[in-house]
Image: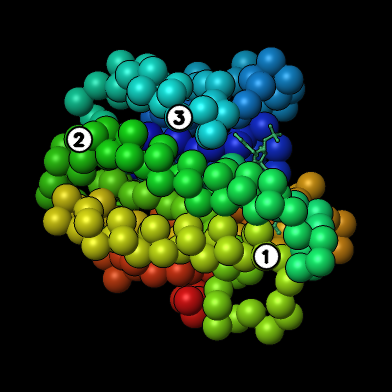
Amino acid sequence: MNSILITGCNRGLGLGLVKQLLNSNKPAKHIFATCRNPDKAQELNELKAKHNNLHIFPLDVSNYDSFDNLVQQIDEIVKDDGLNVLLNNAGVAPRSTRLNFAKDTDLRETFEINAIAPVMLTKAFIPLLKKASSANESQPMGVQRATILNMSSLMGSIEDNGQGAAYAYRMSKAALNMATKSMSIDFKNDGILCVTMHPGWVRTDMGGTNAPMQIEDACKKMLQTILSLNETHNGTFVRYDGALLKW
Ligand SMILES: NC(=O)c1ccc[n+]([C@@H]2O[C@H](COP(=O)([O-])OP(=O)(O)OC[C@H]3O[C@@H](n4cnc5c(N)ncnc54)[C@H](OP(=O)(O)O)[C@@H]3O)[C@@H](O)[C@H]2O)c1
């Protein structure tokens, strides 16, 4: 792939994916890593000092008014190549998950960051994704052409829900999965692949210390899967290792 934009790259899986991308055999020409406070993103800035293909941009994914400006800045860098991959990774998970502790504010904020923001950011980047798809028209669907990848969670699977609770998080990820399915239909003829992915249960601030997977391992497997996505994956829910998941 020529270019990829990832949200929420100052820590956790976003940062882990940036590291994997930078260390890959054929690193992308442009890796656009966004985060809310670039000044405080120490590790990301250290990587930037060593890698010319890493660009850091400030982005609060709930600040929709800032999207056009970001798109314009990326457009000026990628020019006619467009943007190959948009990876909506930034997410939140409220602490209280049982219904008697549910707060309307948590439900709204989680829905906003995990479901609404990826839709709005995707809407803003569609012209650049279409440009990349047209520029690579002879290529099969995949990251070498144009791809929207939404970082979901198995917690968003209705069929897999055997434990209840986690209202805000489960609802937001189920909605993100539905949005991905619609995108996969709406942009199929444009050659843009749309996939929703579960990264595994990973030891990040969100995943917690009991999570079985380390960030490096999860991100290595996710990148392998991301690089191998093809048209058979369009509109599917995949695990970090490529296994198909139930909705
Ligand atoms: N870890 C797991 O086990 C697991 C499992 C399933 C799915 N996931 C999903 O994987 C994704 C990454 O999770 P993670 O484990 O890496 O979580 P994390 O360590 O808590 O990191 C979350 C990232 O999202 C960013 N973020 C939150 N709100 C934002 C906003 N309004 N604008 C921009 N960035 C924002 C955070 O930035 P700040 O530092 O500025 O807050 C941070 O970079 C999420 O979508 C999550 O739901 C994780």
CA gap, disc 1 to disc 3?
Answer: 25 Å
Question: What label does residue 167 carry, if any?
Answer: 1
Q: Is mark 3 within 8 Å of ligand 1?
A: no
Nearer to me, 74 or 100: 100
Question: What label does residue 64 carry, if any?
Answer: 3
Q: Earlier in the sequence, mark 2 or mark 1?
A: 2
Q: Which residue is mark 2?
A: 131
CA gap, disc 2 to disc 1?
Answer: 38 Å
CA gap, disc 3 to disc 2?
Answer: 22 Å
Q: Residue shown at 40%/40% (left/top)?
A: 120
Residue 176 appears left or right of 3:
right
In the picture shown, does residue 4 fall above or below 65?
Answer: below
- Within-10-Å neighbours for mark 3: few <14, some 14–19, many 20+: few
Q: Earlier in the sequence, mark 3 or mark 2?
A: 3
Q: Residue shown at 20%/25% (left/top)?
A: 80
Residue 81 appears left or right of 109:
left
Helix, strand or loop status at disc 1? helix
Helix, strand or loop status at disc 3? helix
Q: Residue shown at 60%/37% (left/top)?
A: 8
Residue 208 appears left or right of 65:
right
Instruction: Let me know if residue 81 appears in the view.
Output: yes
State the residue lying farthest toward the right.
209
